[in-house]
Image (cartoon, grey):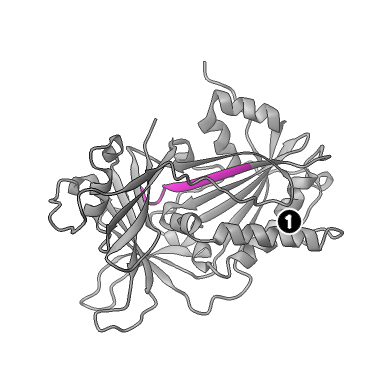
Amino acid sequence: METILQKSMIAAIQSVPPMEVTKHRRVRSISVGDPLGAGMFQRTLNIVTYYKHAGDSGCNRGWLVAGWIKESLGRALNEHPIIAGRLRWRRKTTTAGEDGLEVVANDSGVRLVEARFPASLPEFFEMVKRDKSRAEAETVFWTDIDEVDPQFSPLFYVQVTCFESGGYSIGISCSILLADILLETDFLTKWAQIQSSLAHLQTTLKPLFYIPSNKRNNFLTELSRSASVLDRGDPFVFLAETCSKMSLVCMKKAVANRETARADVFLFVKEQGGDENGTTTERDGTEVEIHMTETRDEAFSDCDCCDDLGEVADVGVLLDVSLAFDDKFEGSSCWIGSISKGLAFGVPSAFGGTKSLVKFIIALPK
């Protein structure tokens, strides 16, 4: 018999843009032959952490945290405005150009969702034991990117969920197209530091966007989460050295002769420089390349990697910083959403030279 689970009730949704206007709007190119087949409009990196504040017997602490996040997240986005950007179709402007997709840092903002769960935190953990996928899906919010007009869809959501009798969670859902920023930069660490400093410097003041529990009588019922977060796979992580080309062939070598090689989508982030004349463009930085399984049988001869790739298993991708004040950490979870048959995701840890140290995140359906 199917487990009956409670549903989170949404109290508020806000947009959080960078505190400062982004003057140089960098663009991240997306290289993919079949965006629909690759599931790139649905795939997400999801992270949720749980906290309990001593003496908190209601939702007020969680609402306070949500109020400070509105400001701390805006400040953190100043250094990584692409997170607050949007995906758009790129139309060719020259005969040499080509159609495609790109993420532009246009300051449209991330979504901050405040929700309430009709059970205590210990009761919720019991629900997780019975049905982890469905229970934890209530702690994150994600709406699939619109395939026709993607420029209107957020790429990053934060949900603060308050539990009865105290306790709250902070859930992050990020498009897989931007997941490397969470995994290989100090964005989360700096955001946590800003959040903590705001709390300590202004302990006697309430956040500007704080609404106490006794004034939260109405909840949004017409909003629904995408089912993508239910189709989940827990990540397995290892490091490997590849050649500086960081090609699809490198990825296939890294996952060859492993169960993880049955992933149907290969995605990796590459360094992107100026044009062929050496001219600097707005697309300098990184590019995301996505390949489907139909190209998996290509020869390995194009790659100059050695056959013996060193690896370190169980690196881990779980959130290792506290996006809270000084509250007691109660646990965390991390998964890839809309996993389909599986995903292999390569994130370079170091560019340049003849070798690149790459973090491989492999997620497969259970």
Q: Nearer the viewer, residue 171 or 209?
A: 171
Magenta segment: does it hold 43? yes
Which residue occupies 29% across, 77% down?
A: 93
| Residue 151 image point, x, y percent | 45, 63
Residue 19 seen by the camera = yes
| Residue 2 image point, x, y percent | 52, 19
Span highlighted in magenta in the image = 36-49
Q: Residue furthest right?
A: 204
Which residue occupies 35% across, 82% down?
A: 280
Which residue occupies 23% across, 48% down?
A: 308
The quadrant of the image that shows the C terminus is top left
Quarter of the figure with residue 259:
top left
With 306 as the anchor, is 161 left or right in this view?
right
With 54 as the anchor, is 285 left or right in this view?
left
Q: Which of 249 and 103 is in front in this view?
A: 249
Density class for disc 1 (Cα within 10 Å; few <14, some 14-19, many ≥20) is many
| Residue 131 image point, x, y percent | 54, 26
Which residue occupies 79% across, 59% down?
A: 200
Asked if 127 appears above or below 339 in the picture, the reply is above
Find numbered disc 1 in the image and state the secondary structure of the residue it sits on: helix
Asked if 110 appears above or below 296 in the picture, the reply is below
Residue 37 seen by the camera = no
Q: Which of 89 and 84 is in front in this view?
A: 84
Say which residue label 1 marks.
67
| Residue 334 image point, x, y percent | 51, 42
Quarter of the figure with residue 161:
top right
With 226 as the anchor, is 41 left or right in this view?
left
Q: Which of 342 and 36 is in front in this view?
A: 342
Magenta segment: does it hold 317? no
